[in-house]
Amino acid sequence: MDEMIRERIKQVKKGDQSAFEDVVSFFQNKIYQHCYRMLGNAHEAEDIAQEAFIRAYVNIHSFDDRRKFSTWLYRIATNLTIDRIRKRKPDHYLDAEVKGTEGLNMYSQLADNGRLPEEEVEGLELQRYIQQEIIQLPPKYRSIIMLRYIEEFSLQEISEILDIPLGTVKTRIHRGREALRKKLRHV
Amino acid sequence: MKCNNEAVELMHKYLDGDITKEQEQTLSQHLESCDACQRHFHELKRTITFIQSAEQIKAPANFTATVMEKLPTEKKRIKYTRWFKAHPMLTAAAIFFVFMLSGMFSVWNQDSELVVSKQEDLVINGDTVIVPQDVTVDGDLLVKNGNLIINGTIDGNVTLINGKLIEEPIEGEGLMASVGEVNGELKHVDQVFEWIWYSIKQLFQSVFAL
Ligand SMILES: [Zn+2]
């Protein structure tokens, strides 16, 4: 897959716009998910994830081929989500938190219909609960926890994505793990 | 060994793969004898498993298509060409100034002699160019500062600059009128500005024919 992406990026740099479609298609779920967990709602997540791909396309010539494209792309996406969070007004922020539970209602309805086996529903509810706990972590811990355990980047890569020293990444991942441990210990 | 500082610190080092052999031994020895730390370590590992099991979120169905639609469409070079085509008057004005600088006006004013692009088989009578009845001009014909009478055939475009096509018989000169045919476009350029416009169009055609 890395080879396919490398090839497509080369084509995009030569001016072949259609080659970018494969890149978007390959990363869309990962980047959207990352934005969703950073922002807590689907509307902003879609907006920012799209913006991330557009910025990547426009600035493709500043991407160094010897590096990992995913790291570069996540960096763009993460910076955009952090900007968006900073620009939020306090009341807007509350709105966003409420919107973040829309999906939860949908799943609760599914459960009410009794279409899913009970265990699976419990699994989904647990996943939703975990999701909510992750979203409630402060952004600087949340981004690292997600990049490490959901997107499976190494600590060194996370330091590159967020442009912060490796030592800071370690301190924050420790605190993030401890915060989540306290929230999830009774589950 | 203090549980909250040292032991927990070692647990996180372990989780990040940063732990040395000696530290790992120290940690496991402590865990064997300390229930609280054992629980803490278990909870940390369980937390990580929980995070990893978080539901996968998928992008909306039309995501890729929407992004592709929003991308800036063309390369710059193509855009410039489009701009010229979309703004012919501005482009013409720009070219007009270039022409002015290159002294086109003086050329126009000084040059009042009869010019014919092709001379073979044509009759020149004063300032009138005649295409005789039995002559076929193969290709475009340009006449500048003179009139034209076509009795034969022209297989191409005719451009008349500062002159006209004589269609009515001229008095006292017998049947002197154009009765032949032009198998192309007939263009009249009588004014300075028309001449400029004609030049610009020619330039455009040569630029965009590339
Ligand atoms: Zn202990």
Image (cartoon, rainbow, N blue to C red):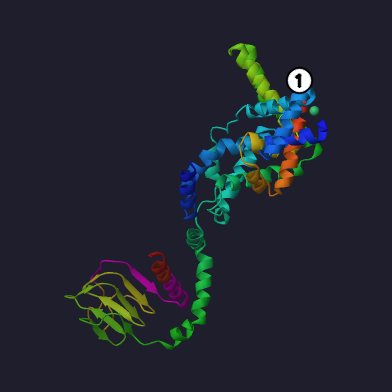
> On the picture, is A149 further left or further right than B91?
right
What residue does disc 1 label?
A186
**Could you tell me which chain the residue with mark 1 belongs to?**
A
- The magenta segment: B179-200
Residue drawn at x 53%, y 72% is: B94
The image shows residue B205, relative to residue B9, as above or below, that is: below
**Residue A39 visible, this orientation:** no
Element on which disc 1 rests: loop
Q: Residue at coordinates 45% horizontally, 77% vertically from top-left? A: B191
The front one of B33 and A106 is: B33
Give the camera-side residue of B70 and B196. B70
Tell me where residue B146 sits by quadrant. bottom left
A82 sits to left or right of B166: right
Q: Is residue A47 left or right of residue B196?
A: right
Label 1, residues with CA under 10 Å away: few <14, some 14-19, many ≥20: few
Residue A166 image position (x, y, % from top left): 70, 47
**In which quadrant of the rendered view does residue B143 lie?**
bottom left
**Residue lying at 28% horizontally and 81% vertically, measured from the top left:** B129
Give coordinates of residue A81: x percent, y percent.
69, 42
The answer to whether residue B36 is magenta is: no
Callout 1: CB less than 8 Å from ligand 1:
no
Figure check: B44 above or below B145: above
Q: Does residue B38 appear to the left or right of A146 in the view shown?
A: right
The image quarter containing residue A170 is top right
Specify the quadrant that holds the C terminus of chain A: top right
